[in-house]
C-alpha cells in the first residue's frame, strides 16, 4: 500500500472502518484524528472520549476494541498506544517515514494527493474589492493578502476557485466627482497620475458642496443623470473606473494576484428589481418608514435592527447589490461555496445578509452554497492607533510596498554583499513583498495587527525573510553537493534510491514534521485561517535548522548522505509549496 499524503485523514478512515468491525455505532463515531503534541506521538484520535461519554461506556474499553479492529496496515506503519482516559496515539515507524518521503516527491503530486471533499466544487472568493476613484491604502492590504492565500488553499484542496474583485464602483461619491471633473479637471495631472487627480477632484467637489447648497444639489443631479444612463456622465464614470483598475492592477501584480472576474456593484444594477420582488413575495421584506427592510425576529439584535435593502428615496444600496451578488454567484457560477473577505466592521452586514439569503433561498428552493464571511482586525501602528503617515494621512499601498522593498534591499545587502547589486535588487523585490504578506498571514486574522517594520523585515523570528532564507540555504546545499557522483538535485534528491532508514533524532524529528504538512493545510483550509500553515512552516524551518546543525549532510557514507539529501529535498518541496500556498514567491539564492 502506498503511504498516503494526508496521514491523519487515512487514520480517520481506518478508525471508521475499525468502528464497523468492532461493532460500534459507526455512523455516530467521529475519530477526530489530529496532529499530536510531539510528546504523545505523531497523531492522536480524540473522538473516542465523546463517543463513550454520550453512551456511558468506558472510553478505554472502547479504545481497546477499536485498536484491536484496526486494519493490519495501520499496525505495520505505526506504534499504536492507548493513553490517558482513552486517547489513541499513533507514532510512525521510521520505515513509514522514509516511505512517505520517497512517495511524495513533487508539487504536482502533493496537490493531486491533497484533494478533499472540495474536489470538483466551485468556490467564489470575493476579496480585495476596493472602492474606485481612490488609491489603495494600507487598509486594503489585508483583504488582498488573506483572500489570495485562501484562494490558493481552496484550490489545493481540489476546488475550482473564481477570484472575484467586487469593486465599489457605484457609490454616491460619483456625483461630486463628476461635478468637479466637469469644471476643475487638470489634464496634465490626469495624465501623470489619474488616481491622484480623481482624489483631488473629489476633495474639490466635496468642499464646494459643503460650502454651497446649490453645488450639493448640482452634484446630486449629476448622480441622478449617471444612474439614469446619461452618456456624458457614463463616459466620465467609465474613465474613472478604468483608471482605477489600471492602478489597482499594479498592486495586484506585485502581490501575485490575478482576478478571474471583476464584477463590481454596478454590474448588479439591473438585477435589483428581481431582488425586491422575490424578497417581498416570500414575505421576508417589509415596508418600514418608506424603506424596504428585512428583520430577523429570531435574532437578538436583528429583530429590531433593519437590513435596509431599498432606501426610502427608492435607491438601491450595498445590501441590495450584495443580495443580487449572492444570487448571481449561485445561478451563474453554480457556487458550492462563497467567501467574502473584509474587515470585521462589516460583520453585521454579512450576518444579516447571510440570514436573509438562507431564508430567501429556502423559500424559493434555490440551492444554498456554503457562506463564509472571513473577517480580520485593523492594522495599527506600534502605539495601537490606526496606521498613518507622520502628518496623519493614510499610507498608500504602493508606497508601503516600495518601502518594504527598500528595507529588504538593506537587509540583503548587509548579509550578502557578495551578490551583485542588480540581483540583490531582484531578491529585495521578492523579500519586500513577501515580508508584508507573511507578517499578515502569520498571525490569527481575527486579531488587530501591529505593524512594526523591524519585526516584519527581519531574518529573526517568524518572518518571510527567515523562511525564504531557509529555502535558499537548501538550494545552496544542492548547488554544492548535487554535482557529485550521485547527481542529486533538489527536485530529485536521491536519484539512485540509496537513502536508507532514518536514524538520528534530528533526522527523525524533521521527517516527523514533514509528514504533518497535509494536516496543517487541512486545518488552515477548513478554518479559512492561513496562520495555521504559517506556523507550521516556521516550525518546519526550525526543525530543519536543528537537523542541519546536528547532522552533517556531506558525509562519505553514500546511504547516510542520500537520506540526508532526501530530507533536504523534501523540506524544500514542502517549504516552497507552503509558501506558494500563502501567495509568496520564493528564492533560490538570498
Ligand atoms: N467595497 C467594499 C469596501 O471597500 C468591500 C466589498 C466586499 N464585498 C462585498 N460583496 N460586499 O468596504
Image: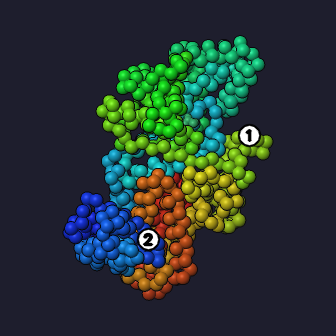
Task: Looking at the picture, tell me which residue is in the foreground, 26 or 10.
Answer: 26
Q: Residue at 53% across / 41% down in the picture?
A: 347
Task: Looking at the picture, tell me which residue is in the foreground, 306 or 175.
Answer: 306
Q: Position of residue 44 (x, y in %)?
A: 39, 70
As drawn, the label of residue 134 is: none
Q: Which quadrant of the figure contains the C terminus?
A: bottom right
Display colour scheme: rainbow
As drawn, the label of residue 36 is: 2
Q: Position of residue 172 (x, y in %)?
A: 60, 24
- Local secondary structure at mark 1: loop
Corner quadrant of residue 435: bottom right
Q: Is residue 556 above or below residue 564?
A: below
> Can you tell me which quadrant of the image ligand 1 is in?
top right
Left or right: 151 as drawn, with respect to 437: left
Task: Looking at the picture, tell me which residue is in the foreground, 379 or 131.
Answer: 379
Disc 1 target residue: 393
Whether residue 76 is visible: yes
Amino acid at each position: 500500500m502506498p503511504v498516503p499524503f494526508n496521514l491523519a485523514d487515512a487514520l480517520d478512515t481506518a478508525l471508521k472502518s475499525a468502528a464497523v468491525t468492532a461493532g460500534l455505532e459507526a455512523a455516530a463515531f467521529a475519530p477526530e484524528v489530529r496532529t499530536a503534541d510531539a510528546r504523545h506521538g505523531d497523531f492522536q484520535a480524540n473522538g473516542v472520549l465523546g463517543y463513550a461519554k454520550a453512551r456511558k461506556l468506558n472510553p478505554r474499553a472502547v479504545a481497546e476494541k477499536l485498536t484491536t479492529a484496526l486494519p493490519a496496515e495501520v499496525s505495520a506503519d505505526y506504534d499504536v498506544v492507548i493513553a490517558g482516559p482513552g486517547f489513541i496515539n499513533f507514532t510512525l515507524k521510521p520505515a513509514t517515514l522514509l516511505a512517505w518521503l520517497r512517495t511524495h516527491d513533487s508539487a504536482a503530486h502533493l496537490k493531486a494527493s491533497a484533494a478533499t471533499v472540495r474536489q470538483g466544487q466551485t468556490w467564489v472568493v470575493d476579496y480585495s474589492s476596493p472602492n474606485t476613484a481612490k488609491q489603495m491604502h494600507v487598509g486594503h492590504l489585508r483583504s488582498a493578502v488573506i483572500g489570495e492565500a485562501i484562494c490558493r488553499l481552496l484550490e489545493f484542496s481540489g476546488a475550482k476557485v473564481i477570484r472575484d474583485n467586487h469593486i465599489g464602483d457605484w457609490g454616491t461619491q460619483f456625483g461630486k466627482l463628476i461635478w468637479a471633473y466637469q469644471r476643475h479637471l487638470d489634464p496634465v495631472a490626469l495624465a501623470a497620475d489619474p488616481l491622484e487627480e480623481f482624489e483631488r477632484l473629489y476633495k474639490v467637489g466635496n468642499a464646494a458642496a459643503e460650502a454651497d447648497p446649490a453645488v450639493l444639489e448640482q452634484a446630486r443631479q449629476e448622480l441622478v443623470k449617471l444612474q439614469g444612463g446619461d452618456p456624458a456622465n457614463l463616459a466620465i464614470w467609465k474613465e474613472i473606473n478604468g483608471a482605477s483598475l489600471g492602478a489597482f492592477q499594479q498592486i495586484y501584480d506585485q502581490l501575485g494576484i490575478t482576478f478571474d472576474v471583476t464584477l463590481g456593484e454596478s454590474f448588479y444594477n439591473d438585477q435589483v428589481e428581481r431582488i425586491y420582488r422575490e424578497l417581498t413575495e416570500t414575505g421576508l421584506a417589509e415596508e418600514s418608514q418608506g424603506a424596504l427592510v428585512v428583520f430577523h425576529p429570531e435574532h437578538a439584535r436583528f429583530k429590531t435592527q433593519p437590513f435596509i435593502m431599498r432606501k426610502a428615496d427608492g435607491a438601491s444600496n450595498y445590501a441590495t447589490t450584495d443580495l443580487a451578488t449572492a444570487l448571481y454567484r449561485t445561478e451563474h457560477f453554480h457556487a458550492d461555496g462563497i467567501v467574502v473577505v473584509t474587515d470585521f466592521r462589516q460583520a453585521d452586514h454579512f450576518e444579516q445578509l447571510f440570514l436573509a439569503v438562507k431564508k430567501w433561498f429556502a423559500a424559493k428552493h434555490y440551492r444554498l452554497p456554503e457562506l463564509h464571511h472571513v473577517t480580520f482586525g485593523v492594522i495599527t501602528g506600534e502605539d495601537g492607533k490606526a496606521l498613518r503617515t507622520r502628518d496623519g494621512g493614510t499610507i498608500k499601498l504602493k508606497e508601503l510596498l516600495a518601502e518594504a522593498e527598500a528595507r529588504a534591499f538593506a537587509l540583503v545587502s548587509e548579509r550578502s554583499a557578495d551578490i551583485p547589486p542588480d540581483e540583490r535588487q531582484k531578491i529585495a523585490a521578492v523579500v519586500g513583498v513577501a515580508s508584508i504578506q507573511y507578517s499578515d498571514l502569520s498571525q490569527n486574522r481575527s486579531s488587530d495587527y501591529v505593524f512594526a517594520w523591524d519585526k516584519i523585515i527581519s531574518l529573526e523570528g517568524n518572518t518571510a525573510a527567515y523562511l525564504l532564507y531557509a529555502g535558499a540555504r537548501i538550494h545552496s546545499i544542492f548547488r554544492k553537493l548535487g554535482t557529485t557522483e550521485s547527481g542529486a538535485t533538489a527536485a530529485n534528491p536521491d536519484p539512485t534510491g540509496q537513502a536508507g532508514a532514518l536514524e538520528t533524532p534530528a533526522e527523525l524529528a524533521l521527517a516527523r514534521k514533514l509528514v504533518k504538512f497535509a494536516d496543517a493545510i487541512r486545518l488552515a483550509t477548513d478554518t479559512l485561517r492561513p496562520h495555521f500553515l504559517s506556523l507550521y512552516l516556521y516550525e518546519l524551518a526550525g526543525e530543519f535548522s536543528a537537523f542541519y546543525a546536528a547532522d552533517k549532510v556531506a558525509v562519505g557514507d553514500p546511504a547516510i548522505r542520500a537520506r540526508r539529501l532526501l530530507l533536504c529535498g523534501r523540506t524544500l518541496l514542502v517549504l516552497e509549496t507552503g509558501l506558494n500556498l500563502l501567495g509568496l514567491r520564493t528564492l533560490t539564492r538570498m
